[in-house]
Image (tube, helix red, strand yellow):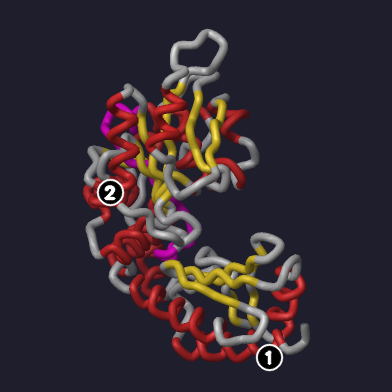
Amino acid sequence: MIDLRSDTVTRPTDAMRRAMAEAEVGDDVFGEDPTVRALEEETAALLGKEAALYVTSGHMANQLGLYVSTRSGDEVWAHEHHHLIGDEQGATAVLARALPRLYSDGDVPSEALLERWISGRGDVHRAEPALVWLENTFTGRVVPLAEQRRVTDFAHRHGLRAHLDGARLWNAAAALEVSPAEVAEGFDSVSVCFSKGLGAPVGSALAGDAATIARARRARKLLGAGMRQAGIIAAGALYALREHRERMVEDHARAATLAERIDRVRGLSARARTNMVLVATPEGRATPYAEAFARHGVRALAIGEETIRLVVHLEITDRDVEEAATAIAKAATEL
């Protein structure tokens, strides 16, 4: 079975397992785990930030980023399809108790929309805006850095903070051929995942200035997420950060090849976005097509009524791409 549901399905490589088994550890709640500290310091340096905090998931990193930048009842401006809104069980309302204000057009809010939303600030009838939220990549799409900076500049001119959900920031940096710090520039806080494109078994980080991360560390403990000898899992993330970033362009190239092959299949159209391939099916048929793919040995996710997502990751080879494309073509003849 070729598993293309997500880049989170990868298993640790032999070298990563050795690094984890041999990791030097200590009590991280006391700040004494040297491997966790090394991971946090290297992550912060790569992102051009003062500090970083290792956490168990991207969900937690995002929620901590929200928590440290808002007060109860404040507004966060986000896209209706951001992970924060649709994939975190309403934690925005439950934990930070923030009010999402959502846009749907474009990967970033337009200048006209930002001006319209800020114009009501101070009105006693409405929530106070506090935070602007962006994602890069966004469903595999790379958001232009100039557009990011336009939004973060607007936020800072008006006293708002800006957060980047950079779960796949490493993919964005690879695709743009820039440093991770350039993608993270202008944001007060940035979340990144080690368990997606990098292939670590667990973990994410939140990065920002020292005061922001100090508050996030307290909030992590508040959530019951203080970790002890976490260096065992941090070592996998650290290995991935050091050894797997350079190879991400291989995933992008394989995704492009897979999309090209699928695009030739009657009834389907496909396009590659970094390490993702989005396949458009006939109306309302995404789930039956995904089920047919699975019967022919390719696991995929239907992410809408007419869209299937395939994600290339470090376990996928050129041969896997060829076999997956052939299997999908055969599956399509059944429907």
Residue labelled with disc 1: 330
- The magenta region covers 197-214
Image quadrant assignment for residue 91: top right
**Residue furthest toward the top?**
124
Kind of residue at disc 1: Lys
Dot 2: what SS? helix
Q: Is residue 22 left or right of residue 47?
A: right
Discs 1, 2 touching: Cβ within 8 Å: no
Residue 134: x and y, percent? 42, 43
Report crowding for label 1: few under 14, some 14 to 19, many 20 or more residues within 10 A (C-alpha): some
Residue 215: x and y, percent? 38, 27
Residue labelled with disc 2: 146
Query: In this rendering, is residue 252 above or below 38?
Result: below
Query: In this rendering, is residue 324 above or below 25?
Result: below
Residue 212: x and y, percent? 33, 29
Dot 1: what SS? helix
Q: Is 200 part of what is drawn in magenta?
A: yes
**Residue at left 59%, top 72%?**
279
